[in-house]
Image: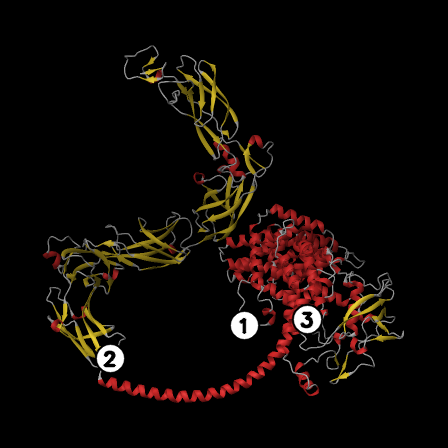
Amino acid sequence: YWDQENHLCLSSKEETKETLLESAASCPSLIASDVPPSPSGAAQDFTLSLSNIQQREDLECDFGTDQRYEATWLDNSTVKCSGVVLSTAQRSQVYHLNLRRRGSFTRQLEDIFLDSPQPTKVEVYNCGVGSSDCSQCWGREDQGHLCGWCENSCRPRDDCQPITDPCPAPEIHKISPLRGPTEGGTLLTVQGRNLGQRPAGVKIFIGDVPCDLLPQHYTVSVELVCRTGRSERDGVEFVRVDVNQSGTGASKEKFSYLVPKLLSMEPEKGSRAGGTRVTLRGEHLDIGSQVRVKVNDTLECSITEKTDEMIECVMPPALQALAESVAVCVEFEDHPCKNLELSTIYTYEKNPTISSIHPTKSFLSGGRTITVSGRGFDLVQSVTMQVREIGQMDCLVLSSSTIICRSPASTQSQETSVQFVLNGVLYTGDGPSSSDNKQEEEDGDLHKGHFLLEYVEDPQFFTANKEKLIKHHSGEPLTLIINKVPSDLELMPEEYSVMIGSYPCNISFHNDQLFHCTINGLLSSSESELPVTVQVGNFHHTIAKVQLGGSELAIVVSIVVCCVLLLLCTVALVVYCTKSRRAERYWQKTLLQMEEMESQIREEIRKGFAELQTDMTDLTKELNRSQGIPFLEYKQFVTRTFFPKMCSDYEKSLVQPTYENDSLGPRVVPETHPLLQDWQATNTTRPNIEEGITLFSTLLNNKHFLITFVHALEQQKDFAVRDRCSLASLLTIALHGKLEYYTSIMKDLLVDLIDASASKNPKLMLRRTESVVEKMLTNWMSICMYSYLKETVGEPFFLLLCAIKQQINKGSIDAITGKARYTLNEEWLLRENVEAKPQNINVSFQGCGMDSLSVRVMNTDTICQVKEKIIEAFYKNLPFSQWPRAEDVDLEWFDSGSNSRLLQDLDNSSVMEDGRKKLNTVFHYKIPEGASLAMSMKDIKGNTLERVKDLDTEKYVHLVLPHDELIETKKAHRHSHRKKVLPEIYLTRLLSTKGTLQKFLDDLFQAILCIPPERPPLAVKYFFDFLEEQADKRGITDPDTLHIWKTNSLPLRFWVNILKNPQFVFDIDKTDHMDACLSVIAQAFIDACSISDLQLGKDSPTNKLLYAKEIPEYKKRVQCYYKQIQDMSPLSEQEMNAHLAEESRKYRNEFNTNLALTEIYKYAKRYRNQVANALETNPTARRTQLHHKFEQVIALMEDNIYECCSEA
């Protein structure tokens, strides 16, 4: 009984009051109502209906949280809770609404609630959880969740007004399985994003074949399951998903329709009891979602293993009604077996029968050979012997009538029964009765298939007289007599063996009580005692030990051998002492020669060390960092990078221009290039060529045409590597205004290249530039990295070049051979101690408008070298292209008497040395310190001598002869007072030069391998992420492979090219000697990017030894750089496209794209038929009539109006 007044449950009517309720139906209760789902955090009101309410009381809404809401009475049976805010961090959460009485009840501590026979549930949903894409967001509408997709996230619809954008096109990430039969029926699972909001709006196709969607397996937006339709032919097609109002998405993987074939089955027969493991071989046996092997259409062969070419299964037992031969068929996707190519015949034969086992006794240690006799064992593939309460052992089939098993070990003597498992089926003896099975007939207690086996104690053995130690002389035959304790085992001689140490003892005689074993060979061991062990099955027992002793003959032989050895040692000692005294005298003589040579080496090293300590300070002071850096314009950087050979040939073809007078002296006409000039149609231009170029440009902007075009050209054998690089660069120029499109083409071609490389050796990818896409990648990196190169790397790179040039000029340089005192390259090292002194001269340049300058030269400099240093001093703030040549200026020296003398490399005062004319130097003219010289432009061009470096080395000489061997021989006679010094001693100058330049090189590498926060390399991040994505798709997990890909795509493809060719970036003079030094620096950078450790030795080249100590630190910088790039926030396609669009806009109209299109057309014309055939065989190209458009371009360009009209 319920007391309404006190809210108590009473057990009797003794305290009966008028407020007592006697039934549950009369209790005040909350009437359940349906409440629509509401978004998380939104305020809402709840109106609740009550029943059996006699009087109003204070109530509040309780949702199971800490927050309660006051219930306001609307009438006598309705209350309202206002401003209720419920939140959830889950996708959806259900709250239970209860009405709680307010007030204090002294007799009870718990809260008092109104009855709620059916709970009122309030569902609260969070649009931001569990809806990762647009379709998942809108698909929640079926659950009552009013969510909408806006600003790339799922939000309540009230926050997304107005809603105008549809969902993006569907994306397919994975399909499974990838193969199926042409009959269809395969359950194809498609996983991805934005795969629709509900099944009704989704359609799936495999090529043109529809795939029926299964709504019961549909997961909104992320997973579809469909049943493939029948295909008329086998083939490979993409999977396509069409979603209403969202578009179409295609899979990256292809689904294959295949025709399976069954070629053979082995074995073709087995026992009626089943369990036979058969192997079916054929083609495409693991395709589809379900494969079964049917036996006679009613039974099923249990599949244990399945591959493309093989199915292994276990045959079922035969039914009584079955004939001996049955059909075995491979069934795909529940399609009945109608194809004879998937069927074969299997024969059930009589079950094997076991007639007896022998012996019927085993010793406790086990391991005794049990022979099983019977028939039909040729049908048995596996046998297991099970011994009741003891264990089981695998057996071996010897023939169709014999099986051998090993008995397991037992802990006690007992009688037990044995059963056999044949082919995984317990043998029950259900085969035809055999009169030979006497054992079963005699033992009526044994069931069919059970055999008796008795365990007895292990056998016991001992030697004659029970000796434990047997003495034996080594070298003599040994025969042991071993006694047996009588037992019921009836052991045969072949069942036991005897070992003495590691030597087997041959059993020569045997009876029931004893046997003999003999060893006729020599017993030898490092141990003095050898154990005698008897082995029977698993039973091993050592019964005695054989003690080996020596004989008198052995002692005599040992004494003789020792005497002979002592005599030989005495003779050897005498010979050794004699030769040692001779070697000592020779060593003293050699040591004196080495000390003399060491003193010469020490003197050279001391000089080199002093230079190493002082050069860094001198060079830092002399470098003029205030001068402007002569960067090339973007268009010149691009043409030199894209067309290095073409630019080199073009520069050589330029005619030397006429100099003009200005405030800074002579100038050179700036470099131009055909691609930088405007394209103007001449009078001879065909009337339709401009229209043809426009149409051809439209075709190149079609992705299907361009990719087919590139592949068609690369398949031609006469399309050389130079043609491929040229085509790639021309395409880059033609598409420079659409870098987003150019990038997508490059990525598609790279995917094809990765697919081709992944099947062979993926580490070799991008190693060279032998394909169009590899050169396109080089050009793409050059475009994207130009700003970073100019703003971050340009200054330290230019300072390094200046440092190299100044360091080279600080020492002597041979004008003929190019070898110098200071260098990084051993081949360009001047391996002689040429005495040279620096001196300053005052030079004025007539017509320059500048005061005279003090120029530092070496007294070993030729006149041409002096001119070059003077020109550099006057023109150092101008680009090199505006400098005059040394051949086009005259240099005069004014001595103290105001007399002038024209200085030349060769004149009447030149001297002869070793049959060669020696070039004139500052020392030759005896020009003193502080002398005044004047430089002026030559009045007449063309009357000068050849350039010094082009002079014949057989006729002229500067510092050293070209062949060091000859000069050493000749000088030895003329300068006998000079000590001969090894040329290798001057290799220390390489270290001196390296130490001087080290700071500048470290600054350059730091600039290349750093990520400035204000200018992060977006292109590098984007491309490295692309490589990682491609590696993941192909299951390439080797970090070394990814490291090599990144190295080949950026450091070795871009930075090494820039390091070796500074003329691509700056308007400077790259001399041959500077090129040799940059090759050493580039090699150090290449070694730093390599993953393999350098294997260096004394014969290693000096260009690798020079920076061997710094390479490990550089390697860490490279790895850290790759890690920093990987840790950067990923770039979306939209962000990268915006960056590329900005690059295109920044350098718009810089190039003659029409000329580039004309050059590309020449390739199209040359391979017209091959390109046309490729377009015809491409289904997409054929559907969009690209072949006809291509022929129309040919017709317009060749001015064939009739062909153009016919093609149209």
Could you tell me which secondary element the residue under label 1 belongs to?
loop
How packed mark 3 is, by other alpha carbons closer than 10 Å (few <14, some 14-19, many 20 or more), is many
Q: Amino acid at mark 2?
A: Leu
- Residue that carries the numbered disc 1 in the rendered image: 1097
Q: Position of residue 1107 (x, y in %)?
A: 60, 66
What residue is disc 2 on? Answer: 522
Distance between mark 2 and mark 1 Cα atoms: 52 Å
Q: Position of residue 270 (x, y in %)?
A: 27, 57
**Residue linked to disc 3:** 822
- The residue type indicated by label 3 comes to Tyr
Q: In the shown orientation, is residue 834 left or right of residue 945? A: left
Amino acid at the residue labelled 1: Gly
- The percent coordinates of residue 460 (x first, y second) are 14, 66
Q: Which residue corresponds to the image point at 72% horizontal and 51% vertical from the top-left?
A: 1148
> Could you tell which of marks 2 and 1 lies nearer the N-terminus?
2
* Image height of 594 relative to 29, above or below: below
**Which numbered disc, 3 or 1, marks the residue that appears first in the sequence?**
3
Q: Is residue 799 visible?
A: yes
Q: Residue at x 57, y 67 (%)?
A: 1108
Callout 3: helix, strand or loop?
A: loop
Residue at 53 percent across and 85 percent down: it is 588
Query: Which residue corresponds to the image point at 88% horizontal and 70% vertical from the top-left?
Result: 939
- Distance (Cα) linking label 3 and label 1: 24 Å
